[in-house]
Amino acid sequence: MKLSAAAFIALASVAWAGGSACAMNSEPVAAADCVVEGGEKLPPETGGAAAICAAIKDALKSEAGTIQVRVDVKSNAWLVARIERDGIALPDQNMAVSDGKLGKGSIERFARAIAQAVATAG
């Protein structure tokens, strides 16, 4: 099968345009680093330190840059996050549950608050 020059150019143009569209549509992704200290104080139903970092990384997925989050677990009802974005320290984020222990929902709200702090700072 022999293609005419015009058909070859048309096919090459479609292939080239399709390949570049993927690169242009990629979303920013944060290089988020998360450390949890004192995770043994967390109630088991929270999922522990790994669940906190997973929730934070998920909440930060639409942010760009290098983001470091250090979460200190003060008690089974109190978390403090220290955040840096591209080497700049952001205000600490605190979460305390006064009517019980931390749960999965409160961890997710904490992660969204961290993402909001990062978004408004950058």
Image (cartoon, rainbow, N blue to C red):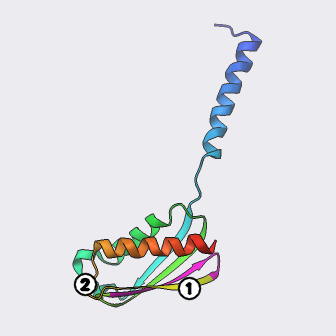
Quadrant of residue 117 within the rendered picture = bottom right
Residue 102 in view in this figure: yes
Q: Name the residue tied to disc 1.
A: 91
User: What amino acid is labelled 2 in the image?
Assistant: Lys
Q: Name the residue tied to disc 2.
A: 101
Q: Residue furthest front?
A: 99
Q: At x 31% / y 85%, what residue is drawn?
A: 97
Quadrant of residue 71 within the rendered picture = bottom left
Q: Which residues are magenta?
A: 78-88
User: What amino acid is labelled 1 in the image?
Assistant: Pro
Which quadrant: the N terminus?
A: top right
Q: Residue furthest bottom?
A: 74
Q: Is residue 86 above or below residue 79?
A: above
The spot of residue 74 in percent (x, y) is 36, 92
Q: Is residue 90 above or below residue 64?
A: below
Principal secondary structure, stretch drawn in magenta: strand
